[in-house]
Image (spheres, rainbow, N blue to C red):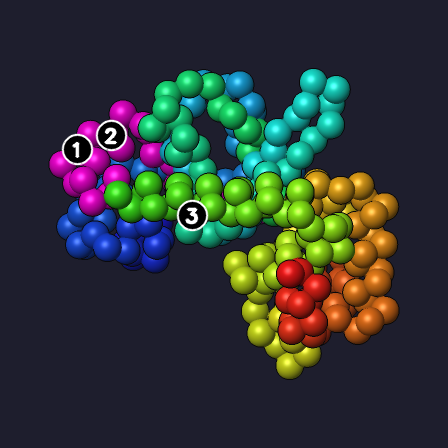
Amino acid sequence: MEDSIISRIPLFEGMNPDEQEELRAMMTQTTLRRGETLFNEGDAGDRLYILLSGKVKLGHASADGRENLLAVLGPGEIVGELTLFDPGPRSTTASAVAPTELLTLDHNQLMGFVESHPQLAKDMLRALAQRLRRTNTALADLVFSDVPGRVAKALLDLADRFGTSTDDGVHVPHDLTQEELAQLVGASRETVNKSLAEFVSRGWIRLEGRAVTLLDVDRLRRRAR
């Protein structure tokens, strides 16, 4: 693990090099294959994870087996922070949707570090608040937006976080199956596929397996409102 890896994580970029090195020394590194589970809903939570590369989805399963995809997290984001501030069982299942590298930090070690570095607690709460804000927006969209609008907004959000500009538009390697994308917007796979097909026919997007290129971002933004 390179010495500079901590400085490239937004959560820790405000720390000085000595503090970053002290925290790095507490961490271990782990990898996940696509489809491999990091932890299951109901598991005891005793550690925090920081994504270095790849993507992890957070999902919740209902009693009848239906699944809801709550978020897709990428490099620089944290996983498992809720049990740090509110000890208890995991509230979601986390699994990789792409080959993923993570840093692992034991809660007890982290809390000891936070006590002597209170700014880190503020930074972690800010990251948690950003996640909560996205969740609140998604809940509001389920009530007030139709499925095509939610699909457009999901594509734009994925583009903001994982997209890269190309000559054609914005290339977004989201790594999600059609079923996972449907779970992310809270609709059936058939309805989401119909929305995607409409966007393709209008020339707004181009589908590329587990990726998409946004060809007309402005029209997608108007459709997402």
- Three-letter residue code for mark 3: Gln
Determine whether 194 is above or below 112 in the image: below
Q: Which residue position holds label 3? A: 130
Quarter of the picture containing the C terminus is bottom right
Q: Which residue position holds label 2? A: 111
What residue appears at the point 18 percent right and 47 percent down from the top-left corner? 19
Distance from disc 1 to disc 2, alpha carbons, whole Å, reads 6 Å
What residue appears at the point 17 percent right and 40 percent down from the top-left corner? 117
- Three-letter residue code for mark 1: Glu
Q: Earlier in the sequence, mark 1 or mark 3?
A: 1
Q: Which residue position holds label 1? A: 115
Residue 97 in sight: yes
Q: Nearer the viewer, residue 175 or 144?
A: 144
- Three-letter residue code for mark 2: Met
Q: Main secondary structure of the magenta part?
A: helix
SS label for mark 3: helix
Q: Nearer the viewer, residue 64 or 1?
A: 64
The label on residue 63 is: none
Other-residue count near label 3 (Cα within 10 Å), few / some / many at <14 / 14–19 / ≥20: few
Determine whether 204 is above or below 42 in the image: below
Q: Position of residue 141 (x, y in %)?
A: 63, 47
Determine whether 66 is above or below 14 in the image: above
Other-residue count near label 1 (Cα within 10 Å), few / some / many at <14 / 14–19 / ≥20: few
